[in-house]
Image: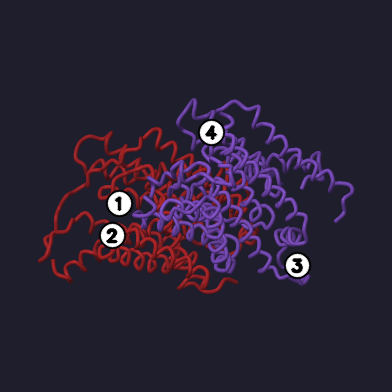
Chain colours: A purple, B red
Amino acid sequence: MNWEGPTAKVYALHVAVVALLVGLNFALPEYHHGVLARVLVLAVFAMGYNVLFGYAGLLSLGHAMFFAAGLYGAGLPLYHLGWGVPAAFGAGIAAGFVASLIIGLLALRTSGVAFMIVTMMFAQVFYLTTLYFGEWTRGDEGLVLQQQARQVTLGAQTLDLTSPATRYLLAVALFAIVLLASVALVRSRHGRVLVAIRENEERTRMLGYDTFANKLAAVVTSGVICAAAGAAYALLFGYVGSTFASVQYSILPLLWVLLGGAATTLGPLIGTLFMYYVIDIASGYTSAYMLVVGAVLILLVLFFRKGVLGTVRERWVGWLP
Amino acid sequence: MAFFPHLLLATLEGLVTSAVLALTALGLSLVFGVMRIVNVAHGEFFMLGAVLAWAITITLTGHPALGFAVALVLSPLIVGGIAWIAERLVLRRLEYNPEATIVATIGLLYIIQQLALTFYGPEARPVAPPFSYRIQLPWFGYSGYKLSIIAASALLLLATWFVLTRTRIGLVMRATQYDRETALAFGIPVGRVYGAVFALGAMLAAVAAVLIVPIQQAHYLMGLDPLLLSFIVVIIGGLGSLRGTVVAALLIGVSDGIISVFFSPTLAKIIATLVVALVLVFRPQGLFGTATK
């Protein structure tokens, strides 16, 4: 890999962002500390969505399914079978892998509008399934994971996932891993092929690339990242409910990514953070937060199609990945 | 009750569902066919129709039939007006880019839903049926109003079919659907046709909602199910095919009615959604459609 020019700058920027987030652990007031931990996990969800939507150009309306697969994949064994935290996290990721592989194999037979509708329908099936098996999932009401179940013993040390500092640092750790992985991904050969598919699939195929295999890999990568976010959400915040599988949670990552800038590595974080605070502040004045979401979506798509970082990259900082 | 009357009841309930579904789905199919965009806010136009019907009937005192008749005319007109404004202000500026319009209509969905929640509230509210005549069958009594829904829907479908195939308006719409550029070259005001089609699609959903609201209460979240079911119908019936839409609505409505009576409604929805998603995966042109050019 070429370590001169932009490469060094790119990695320096991302490491600096992670260092800043770690530093904020000691500086933030309690309320915002909690908010940022949540935002970081949701930003991982958005980064997973961005792999497929931003880079591969596939608009899915069913990503709540992958988030919820991680959520339930981790939450159910922990709650019902008494699994430990690491095993439950692994189970969540495995659930996301299986779900995204199956959905990818089926949904990628379609393209464009049909792809959106198919993914939305599969996600709806998943959502209804979580309601149907209410005996185990408790449906909308959800399951609350108890504090003693959310502790990890490492040698003599016990990590308590309910303590704010641990929770925050684990969220940063997951965020950092996924962030650096996605930088590596988009700069790799596979990442370039995905962008080529987004720009012109026919031509990419003609150049001899297996577009189906590349798109399938993108769906699975995206699904696994989203499932990791879901599993982390269940373990860190201790709640598992059907709401996270509903259509709304398929639309939110789309909103976050569009706002922050599709096909930018840091865009999902900016979009998630900004939207979280917009809703937080707006709900102080009015309960009509859906109005804000709707208006932001329409305004973005009308006047600000590239999002925050997309615009920054276009105008000033061309090397931004 | 024995098996046969039970089945008859389920079929009748299914036919009522089909009647409403056919109108709603036809609206979605028209917009999808002519403008080549997916209107995710279609279910919200349905909801708006029902909520407005409640507001109109509550304002007009007197015989319930009077309020209902006014609602049947006024509610779709208002919804159509709102849709027309949304089309002119937002969708036209997006130049009907498929993905951008989906995002924009999702935004529209949230705005309409929130406005309904703010001004109408979270309660489900009933609307009095215009008449309450019961038809006595040998096994059970059945609401005459429900049967009149089926008749009204059939009439409206016939009227739409007539407009689409036998009038100048329909000709202009079909020309726009067939080839936008050529239509433009022949002096057809494509922009205005798009505005009108979008409004018409929303009005069909609103009419369907006004018809169903006396038996199913108005609620601000009632739009999601019609939206998903309309997608299903449009996909199975094949895009832009009126006959396919009606046949698919009958198929889905009646089987939904029968499955819901004998099994759990959630299970019925799971099976229906899954089957349709698989149809879309393996037979993208729909069961009755022909492959696209």
Cα distance in 3D space between marks 4 and 2: 41 Å
- Marks 3 and 1 sit apart, C-alpha to C-alpha, by 50 Å
> Disc 2 to disc 3, how far (Cα)?
49 Å
Determine which quarter of the picture holds residue A97. Answer: bottom right
In the displayed structure image, the side of residue B265 where residue A5 appears, left or right = right
Name the residue beneath numbered marker 4: A279
Whole-angstrom CA distance, mark 1 to mark 2, is: 9 Å
Q: Crowding near pointer 2: few (<14 within 10 Å), some, many (20+)?
A: many
The residue wearing badge 2 is B16
Cα distance, mark 4 to mark 3? 42 Å
Residue at the front extreme?
A: A156
Q: Is residue A315 above or below residue A245?
A: above
Question: Horizontal and vertical percent for residue B282?
Answer: 52, 73
Of marks 3 and 1, the one in the foreground: 3
| Disc 1 to disc 2: CB gap under 8 Å | yes
Q: Secondary structure at mark 4?
A: helix
- Check disc 3 and report the residue beneath it: A203
Regarding residue B229, the answer to whether it shows in the image is: yes
Label 1 chain ID: B
In the picture of the structure, the residue carrying the numbered disc 1 is B212
Chain assignment, label 2: B
Question: Quick check: B141 above or below A143?
Answer: below
Which residue type carries mark 2?
Answer: Val
Nearest the camera: A138 or A5?
A138
- Can residue B197 be seen at all in this image of the molecule? no
Q: If you read the primary sequence from the N terminus, does the residue marked by circle 1 or circle 2 appear first?
A: 2
